């Protein structure tokens, strides 16, 4: 095989692999804006985390990968709470209907120069994740904005 034929073969194989590969989930999450928040968990652990807002989701999520990082950083065990029967599966940030069985409580302190956001405890539902960009962030859904709205109008 000549050098030119080898290069053509490599290009053809690369093109075939790209065509056969599934669409990247990262493209969907790349467009969402990310913010930093101070998160406090029930075990007392605090950290600065990246969050993204996704109001197409009714729930707020964190992935198994995020949870693994949290376990490594935290000195105390994390409290897992079983999910109520109504939420046995949900559309996750990876666009997959995934079973969810546990959640953790997190107090989110979002700092904005223009709008004051009160610290709010929210449940973060744990999902498997696919290795996408959203796996290393907290995804805040409509439940977070609904809680803030309720508190603002009360």
Image (cartoon, rainbow, N blue to C red):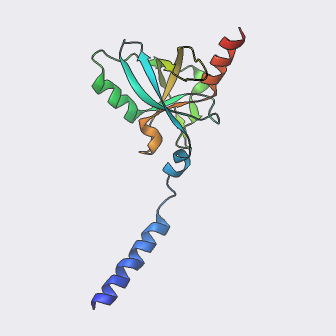
Q: Is residue 128 above or below residue 123?
A: below
Q: Is residue 141 above or below residue 147?
A: below
Q: Residue drawn 38% across and 35% down?
A: 65
Rendering coords of residue 92 (x, y %)? 55, 37
Q: Residue drawn 35% across and 16% down?
A: 45
Which residue lies most toward the front here? 113
Rendering coords of residue 106 (x, y %)? 47, 18
Which residue lies most toward the right here? 153
Question: Which is nearer the eye, 54 or 48?
Answer: 48
Quarter of image, res 57: top right
Question: Which is nearer the eye, 79 or 107?
Answer: 107
Figure quadrant of the N terminus:
bottom left
Q: Is residue 148 above or below residue 17?
A: above
Figure quadrant of the C terminus:
top right
Number of marks in the rendered image: 0
Question: Which is nearer the eye, 47 or 56?
Answer: 47
Quarter of image, res 131: top left
Q: Is residue 100 above or below residue 120?
A: below
Rendering coords of residue 144 (x, y %)? 60, 23
Rendering coords of residue 58 (x, y %)? 63, 29
Which residue lies most toward the top here? 154
Q: Residue drawn 39% across and 78% down?
A: 11
């Amino acid at each position: 095989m000549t050098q030119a034929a080898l290069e053509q073969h490599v290009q053809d194989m690369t093109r075939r692999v790209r065509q056969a590969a599934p669409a990247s989930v990262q493209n969907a999450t790349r467009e969402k804006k990310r913010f930093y928040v101070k998160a406090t968990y029930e075990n007392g652990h605090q950290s600065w985390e990246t969050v993204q807002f996704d109001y197409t989701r009714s729930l707020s999520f964190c992935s198994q990968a995020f949870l693994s990082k949290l376990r490594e950083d935290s000195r105390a065990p994390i409290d897992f709470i079983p999910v109520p029967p109504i939420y046995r599966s949900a559309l996750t940030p990876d666009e997959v209907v995934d079973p969810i069985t546990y959640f953790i409580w997190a107090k989110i302190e979002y700092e904005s120069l223009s709008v004051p956001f009160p610290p709010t405890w929210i449940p973060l539902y744990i999902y498997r994740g696919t290795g996408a960009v959203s796996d290393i962030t907290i995804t805040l859904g409509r439940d977070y904005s609904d809680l803030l709205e309720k508190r603002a109008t009360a």
